[in-house]
Image (spheres, rainbow, N blue to C red):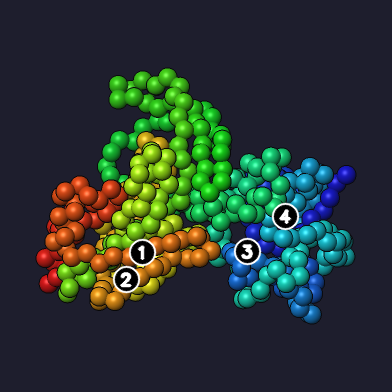
Amino acid sequence: MKHRLFFFGTLRHMPLLEIVLGRVVGTDQIRQATLPGYEVRAVTEGPFPALVAVEGQQAQGLAVDGLSDSDVERLNFYEGGFAYDLRVLRLGDGSEAQVYMAAEGVCTPAALWDLEVWTAQWGDMSCHAAREVMGYFGARDSAQVAAMFPQIRARAWSRTLGERQPAGQGARKATVTLEREARVYAGYLAVDEVTLRHQRFDGTMSPALERSYLVAADAALVLPYDPVRDRVLLIEQIRVGPLGRRDPNLWLLEPIAGAVDAGETPEDAARREAQEEANLTLTALEPVARTYASPGSSTEFYHMFVGLADLPDDITGIGGLEHESEDIRSHLVSFDRFMEMADAQRLSNAPVVLLAYWLAFHRKRLRS
């Protein structure tokens, strides 16, 4: 059976539609169309639109003909995670088409939605996210994927930042051939396995190399520093890495840190995390480093800052977000004590050590 669907929103972006369908869509299948009595509006729940009934208006979109049952099955899997259902509506030319409509009360309409604006800001991320989502087709149901979507979107935004803001260090660039890439685990984090060959320094190609890596979101890290009182704020929380290593010391002293949310800049993430984890407002951010945490085994990328802040005696306390099960205690540490801890190897978190020595180098300038 063949189907006609009307797409008014993000699936008008052809790269995204073809990822969801798993195939190229022929130009003879597509035509511009309208849906009378509706407007396409952005919603506050995410970077996607919804149809809103408005008398006398027409929603612009694409009518796609000749979609198979398997095409619709893939579309239902993708849209199911967004609480959209198919309904049959009449288009402006009098023909009928199936349209994905949001369930009642799920979306909060806002301003008119613009495809070009959305594509520039969200198109790349949405394609990366759709590749992961559709990778679960046939293996997980839409509800399971919807529960994972915050992590999926964070991983997709990390890939988008990697493409837009690559880590440049003047090192070699040469041929790399990716022969296989497979997602072998996905949950709060994900693990990929790859088979690759790369050009060696003598110009020949390497044998096939089997590798795996942890797929994690970009993170913003910030060390709050008060240049007047000459002290820093550190946070303390439990970490599972030491648990896996069977280290009895599971609580670590760290900088404030958190994932860069989709659409967010690392600077915005640093300021948000300071508020969430320590109820702290930063007055300025000093960029320190943009680095991979462990490039041999993880995609995790750090955007590191020293944040200038007012740190009075009563600023410490318990912070973190309840819905993220965070239980975070903050500590004030004088600069001299901070450096003593670094020199005595009593700081077990690598980024906070790097931040300590950066602060030592720039402290005079910051205090002036």
Q: Residue at x 28, y 65 (%)?
A: 331
Q: Which residue is mark 3?
A: 48
Mark 2 and 1 residues: CB-CB less than 8 Å, in contact?
A: yes
Q: Residues within 10 Å of mark 3 (few under 14, many from 20)?
A: many
Q: Nearer the viewer, residue 191 or 238?
A: 238
Q: Spatial distance from mark 1 to mark 3, Cα to Cα?
A: 37 Å
Q: Residues within 10 Å of mark 4 (few under 14, many from 20)?
A: some
Q: Spatial distance from mark 4 to mark 3, Cα to Cα?
A: 14 Å
Q: Nearer the viewer, residue 354 or 238?
A: 238
Q: Spatial distance from mark 4 to mark 1, Cα to Cα?
A: 39 Å
What's the amino acid at mark 3?
Phe
Q: Quadrant of the N terminus?
A: top right
Q: Residue at x 37, y 35 (%)?
A: 296
Q: Which mark is residue 316?
A: 2
Q: Dividing the picture into quarters, in which one does residue 176 lie?
A: top left
Q: Quadrant of the C terminus?
A: bottom left
Q: Spatial distance from mark 2 to mark 1, Cα to Cα?
A: 7 Å
Q: Which residue is mark 4?
A: 80
Q: Earlier in the sequence, mark 4 or mark 3?
A: 3
Left/right placement of residue 358 relative to residue 64 reads left
Q: Assign a secondary structure to mark 3.
A: strand
Eye-nearest disc, 3 or 2: 2
Q: Which mark is residue 329?
A: 1
What's the amino acid at mark 4?
Gly
